[in-house]
Structures are given as C-alpha cells and as structure tokens.
Amino acid sequence: MKNNYFIDTEFIEDGSTIELISIAIVNDNRKLYYQNKDCDFNKADNWIRRNVLANLNGFDINTLSIINNDNWLTKQEIAIKVKESFIPSDFDDVEDMIKNKDDYFVYELDDDELQNLKIIKSLKY
C-alpha cells in the first residue's frame, strides 16, 4: 500500500555541508515537526536568519540561541522519531526507499524531495 508523504526541511548549506535546522513530515495519518538543537546557527547566512531562524518556535534571533526546548531535539533523537513514526518496522534502509521510490510514493518525487530523503538518511541513529 502506498502512502502520501509530504516532507519539508530547512537547512544551512554552505556548498560542502548540509546542516538540518528543522524537519516536518506529514502523511495521511501522522505528522511530525522537530527542530535540530545540534545545529550551528552561526553558520546561517542573512537570508536563512531572516526567513527561517526568525520564525522558529522557541528561538531568539538576536542571540541565535534556543530559549524554549519544546520542539528541539538532537539529530539522533530526530532520526529515531522519524524512524519510529514513519518507516515500517521491517524497513531499515532509506537508501532503498530512494532507489525504489515508486513503491513508496504515489507521485513522482522531484529533486528537492529526493534531497529531503537524503537528509533523513544522513541523520544517524
């Protein structure tokens, strides 16, 4: 059975590193939203600061620091939550999901959506 998954990530990208800021995943039955407290916010460019960091829950844009921990988890904690919430218990490899995307998704994934899956894969748990 196929599920519709909608994935949105925000990240800091400097050409060689992608650092997750936040992730939202929604399907027909569940939703998940977390912010990465391991992120080095000092690496964010002005656009990210104005348009992403300024809108995060529990974040002080003036000091670039977390002021409320409600939605903030480590990358490892986020990876565990994603796996527990959205990946079938008998499924261990997000790379397989990327390679066999037609088995998992109703519609064709575009390049940004494939990048989101690769970001999820990069979260070590």
Image (spheres, grey):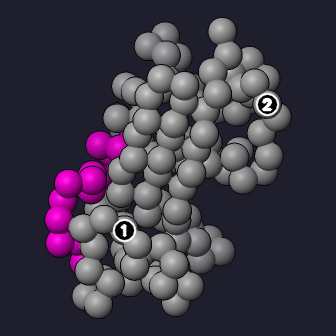
* Three-letter residue code for mark 2: Tyr
Residue drawn where x is 27% and y is 56% of the image: 72
State how far apart marks 2 and 1 are (Cα).
30 Å
Q: Which quadrant holds the N terminus?
A: top right
In the rendering, at what x and y percent does residue 45 appear? 52, 86
In the rendering, at what x and y percent does residue 104 appear? 68, 22
In the image, residue 123 sits, relative to residue 37, either above or below, namely: above
Q: Is residue 107 visible in this depiction of the protein?
A: yes
> Which stretch did the figure color magenta?
65-80
Task: Determine which quarter of the picture holds residue 80.
Answer: top left
Check disc 2 and report its element: helix, strand or loop: loop
Q: Which quadrant holds the C terminus?
A: top left
Q: Which residue is mark 1?
A: 56
In the rendering, at what x and y percent does residue 33 appear? 39, 47
Mark 2–mark 1 contact, CB under 8 Å?
Answer: no
Is 105 contained in the magenta span? no
Q: Which residue is mark 2?
A: 107
Residue drawn where x is 75% and y is 24% of the image: 106
